[in-house]
Amino acid sequence: MIIQHCNLCGHLTEQMIPEGDDKPRDVCTHCGHIQYQNPKIVNACIVEHEGKILLGKRTIEPRSGCWNVPAGFMENGESTRNGAIREVKEEVLADLKNVTLFGVYNIIQRNQVHVYFRGELAHPHFGAGAETSDAKLFAPEDIPWDELAFPVGITALKRYIQEMKTGNFTVQEEDIVIDYEQLKKMNLV
């Protein structure tokens, strides 16, 4: 994505490699400000209660109408953990306990880093939030895999369910490679 106007002075930018850098950047032709673009961070939390996993049905694009692990973009001024807790509260109206890091998933094609936590319901109360039409606990065998919103959520949930069987949870980092045809099929490009 090219940034055409400087976010400091509003003048046009030109793509070039700044001195001391090795990547093309959008640089203001007037004040010289470099317009850096960095990946977005997405916070998510796999929420478990009595052997079941809490999912929310999205009402917003992309992937409206699909089930998803509560997740969303990190806000300024918050930690990844607090962002995941906030997303759970916003999307499925749930309070958590025992929140721990589960995995980091890099989606190079989307310029995103997804930080997944795992947690438990603090009490069995949840519901549909502002961005969801439904919230439901699913036994692992009842998860609607064909109706899940994003490949990263599918990857994380599959690993979670495998580790859930033994109770031995690990923290892993993984690159998620999504081909263009898959993104197109999901209306993400």
Image: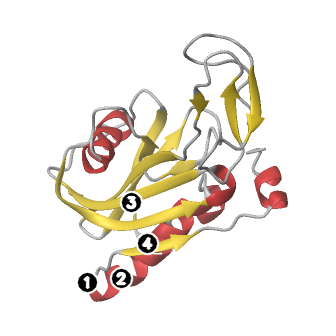
Q: Is residue 76 above or below residue 112?
A: above
Mark 3 or mark 4, which has the lower sequence index?
3
The tag on residue 163 is 2
Real-space Cα distance between discs 2 and 3? 14 Å
Quarter occupied by residue 173: bottom left
Q: Residues within 10 Å of mark 1 (few under 14, many from 20)?
A: few
Mark on residue 116?
3
Of circles 2 and 3, the one toward us is 3
Could you tell me which secondary element the residue under label 1 belongs to? loop
Q: Nearest the camera: 28 or 187?
A: 28
Specify the amino acid type for callout 1.
Answer: Gly
The residue to which callout 4 is attached is: 140
Amino acid type, mark 2? Glu
**In the image, residue 126 lies at what x, y percent?**
28, 42
For label 1, the residue is 167
Residue 21 image position (x, y, % from top left)? 61, 50
- Give the Cα distance between marks 3 and 4: 18 Å
Q: Residues within 10 Å of mark 4 (few under 14, many from 20)?
A: some
Residue type, label 4:
Pro
| Discs 2, 1 touching: Cβ within 8 Å | yes
Position of the N terminus by quadrant: top right
Q: Position of residue 32 (x, y in %)?
A: 62, 24
Residue at 59% x, 31% y is 34
Q: Nearer the viewer, mark 3 or mark 1?
A: 3
Q: Residue at x 42, y 83 (%)?
A: 162
Pinpoint residue 132: horizontal percent, then vertical percent: 47, 35
Q: Are marks 4 and 2 in contact (CB under 8 Å)?
A: no
Of badges 4 and 1, nearer the viewer stands 1
Left or right side of 111 for 158? left
